[in-house]
Amino acid sequence: MNILVSACLMGLCTRYDGKAKPYPGVIELSKNHTLIPVCPEQLGGLATPRPPAEIQEDGRVINILNEDVSAAFKLGAQIALSIAQSTRCVFAVLKSRSPSCGKGQVYDGSFQGRLKEGNGVFAALCTQNDLPVYTEDEINDLSSSVLNS
Ligand code: SF4
């Protein structure tokens, strides 16, 4: 099956700091499945490296330089979703806590390393469009029925 994944989890240096976050469980998935890597923030036109950004109380995405990058986040999320749909991805494995890819928890907007409940811009869009999202922490628990469906 085709599975959409956050590009940084596959070892691509797409993060805001120019680094990757390779995750062994994601690499493992590539043995039996076709992984489609995307970085919504790059697809939205943001540079790498780039200033870190967090979702504010009002829903805007602001970077640490106080620039509003909401439009780039939304554009990148739309493009990444269209890639998922056109390649018929069955679900997505997205990087936890990211303002784009995070599911369930994201940083709270203070740039103090604090978390709050919520989804990243792309993870939320996936959910709204019925594309199931798992974090990298959840994939080790994915049942064989999910992986073999
Ligand atoms: Fe990784 Fe997603 Fe951040 Fe891109 S936007 S670096 S894929 S967590």
Image (tube, rainbow, N blue to C red):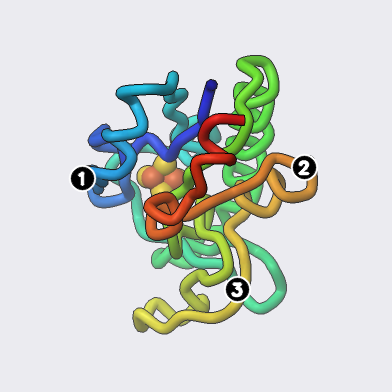
Q: Which mark is residue 130?
A: 2
The quadrant of the rendered image in which ligand 1 is seen is: top left
Disc 1 and disc 3: Cα gap in Å? 24 Å
Disc 2 and disc 3: Cα gap in Å? 25 Å
Q: Earlier in the sequence, mark 1 or mark 3?
A: 1
Q: Amino acid at mark 2?
A: Asp
Please rate how many residues cluster around mark 2, counting C-alpha atoms within 10 Å: few if below 14, some from 14 to 19, many from 20.
Answer: few
Q: Earlier in the sequence, mark 2 or mark 3?
A: 3
Quadrant into which the N terminus falls: top right
Q: Say whether mark 3 is within 8 Å of ligand 1.
A: no
Q: Which residue is mark 1?
A: 19
Disc 2 and disc 1: Cα gap in Å? 30 Å
Q: Which mark is residue 45?
A: none
Question: Which is more toward the observer, 13 or 5?
Answer: 5
Q: Amino acid at mark 1?
A: Lys
Asked where in the image residue 39 lies, by quadrant, the reply is top left
Question: Does residue 17 lie above or below 65 as drawn?
Answer: above
**Residue 26 in picture, x, y percent from top left:** 33, 39
Which one is in front in this view, the residue at disc 2 or the one at disc 1? 2
Quadrant into which the C terminus falls: top right
Q: Which residue is mark 3?
A: 56
Q: Residue at x 45, y 57 (%)?
A: 138
